[in-house]
Amino acid sequence: MRLTLLGTGDARQVPVYGCQCVACAAARADHDLRRLPCSALIECADQRWLIDSGLTDLTERFPPRSLSGILQTHYHADHAQGLLHLRWGQGLVIPVHGPADPEGLADLYKHPGILDFSQPFAAFERRALGALQVTALPLVHSKPTFGYLFEGDGQRFAYLTDTVGLPGDTREYLQRAPLDLLVLD
């Protein structure tokens, strides 16, 4: 199992528009110092799952049929704006798993195009996605939000972003067995 962080920024990203601080100036000069919207790719066996879709260039990064699907933590624009472009694809269906939130980006639910939102996760639901076991973990945010526990290839990764602390039930669930990797924002 392999996790690749594609973006580690918040909604503002780095460089922040109009900011003249040292970090933003350096990011303008060196693209490697930029922080894109929070997103990751998890690969296990023959499966490739995108975690969050805030990157606006998804159609360029991922050729058709190169993703097994998308795991959304929540539907704030900085985590989901790439879906707005991706949905207009043709000739395939991309499963999108995440919390049930038809009002999050309402236009996506009204006009999903090739995106399939028919299998939302419930809190603490565990689902087999090929060789990957995925458990939805409730987080603390202003709208329904999940982090994910990934288990595969004998490893356990937790991806918990855009949260203000951890709910007690989520913390207890994670403490049942050691993690090999924790991504926490």
Image (tube, rainbow, N blue to C red):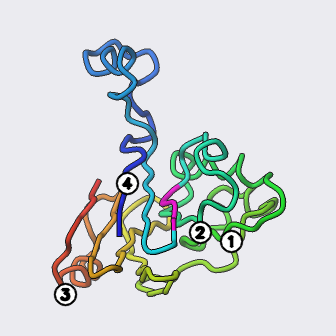
Name the image quarter holding residue 136: bottom left
First-in-chain label (4 vs 1): 4
SS at mark 4? strand
Residue that carries the numbered disc 3 in the rendered image = 176
Q: Residue at x 59, y 69 (%)?
A: 68
Tell me which amino acid carries mark 1: Phe
- Packing grade of label 4 (10 A; few <14, some 14-19, many >=20) is few
Q: CA distance from mark 1 to mark 3?
A: 30 Å
- Packing grade of label 1 (10 A; few <14, some 14-19, many >=20) is some
Tell me which amino acid carries mark 2: Ser
SS at mark 3? loop
Q: CA distance from mark 3 to mark 4?
A: 25 Å
Q: Residue at x 43, y 55 (%)?
A: 40
Residue that carries the numbered disc 4 in the rendered image = 4
Asked if disc 2 and disc 4 are in contact, CB closer than 8 Å, the reply is no
Tell me which amino acid carries mark 3: Arg
Let me know if residue 23 is in the magenta part. Answer: no
Q: CA distance from mark 1 to mark 2?
A: 14 Å
- Bounds of the magenta span? 48-52
Residue 117: which disc? 1
Residue that carries the numbered disc 2 in the rendered image = 68
Q: How many marks?
A: 4
Residue 4's x, y, as percent?
Answer: 37, 54
Q: CA distance from mark 4 to mark 1?
A: 24 Å
182 left or right of 19?
left
SS at mark 1? loop
Residue 81's x, y, as percent?
Answer: 61, 46
Name the image quarter holding residue 179: bottom left
